Amino acid sequence: MADSWKITGYAPKPVVKDALVTHEDALDWDIEVILSGREEAEDKPDDWVIEAWYSRKPTKADKAAVAALFANGAPALTIEKLPDEDWVTLSQQGVEPIDAGKFHVHTPEYPPLADPDIRSFCIPASQAFGTGQHETTAGCLAMLTAMKQRGVVARNVADIGTGTGLLAFAALELWPHAMATASDIDAVCVEVVEYNSNENDVPMGSRHGQLTMVVADGMDDPLLRARGPYDLLIANILAGPLVELAQDFADAVPPGGSVLLAGLLETQEAKVRRAYRRAGFRLAARLVNGDWSILWLRRRSGR
């Protein structure tokens, strides 16, 4: 069995969360390295630990890459060799399943729910839970469920910055006859989405009820543009890109259509909402999950 190693640092919750957000936008991050953040202990909710897991001995460059995630100086980082166990399994310990809306999201270490009214999705923690942002995922799943309950009809769906494909899978579960397109700027996500779709019985393809995957920076892809307009566009990314993409999303969503935005801290919500108000959207609903805002916006008929 290969060696297992870990880089560990301790810092206040906001500091670790900011580092995890920075990691989300780090295009040069080694995809074989799993990064996670969590509470140091249940009785210390504001004291967090950041951990990077390796199947080899970390180098000085590895340590520097973790340190670079901290904008105002990294905490003390330690390197330790772990017992002879599967390092991926070790990195996933403590990752509890997510229950949100009609969905249950779990890692392979947990079984699906037996409840026929709940749709379980199995997503490896190294893909979906290593960012410290599962509150945004859970919030989106809850909001998608609420949108369906409130009568939203989605015939054409796009999930921009899909990552694992999870939110696109959830949209197809709620609107099984929709056209669905998922995109991500990282080409690695193509294999990830295809693997997860196979594991979760989500059909890939270009027809209604199937998911098409493309690699794109925002809306900059001819197939992504050609398959629009989208009456439901989902983007669980970061506040900065959400602001930059406001007009592009408006051009891709018809009047009355919806966008579901997440990946923004509650403190960033006002800036995002201003950008989308200028682009012709109005707020339909919002929820706050932890420190994160999830926004459902609808495009107005008049611009």
Image (cartoon, grey):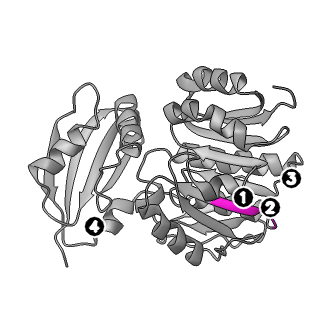
Q: Which residue is mark 3?
A: 153
- Label 2–label 3 contact, CB within 8 A: yes
Residue that carries the numbered disc 1 in the rendered image = 171
Residue at the left extreme, as displayed: 60
Counting from the top left corner in percent of width and height, residue 281 is at: 76, 29
User: Crowdedness of circle 3 by 10 Å Cα count: few (<14), some, many (20+)?
Assistant: some
- Residue 203 in the image: above or below residue 138: below
Q: In the rendered view of the protein, which quadrant contains the C terminus?
A: top right
Q: N-terminal of the two: label 2 or label 3?
A: 3
Of discs 4 and 2, which sits in the foreground?
2
Please, what is the three-letter code of the amino acid marked with disc 2?
A: Trp
Task: Name above or below for residue 237 compared with residue 86.
Answer: above
Can residue 23 be seen in this snapshot?
yes
* Amino acid at circle 1: Ala
Amino acid at pointer 3: Val
**Discs 3, 1 touching: Cβ within 8 Å:** no
- At numbered mark 2, what does the secondary structure look like: helix, strand or loop? loop
- Kindly report the distance in space between the C-alpha atoms of the residues bearing marks 4 and 1: 32 Å
Q: Quadrant of residue 3?
A: bottom left
Left or right: 291, with 4 as reference point: right
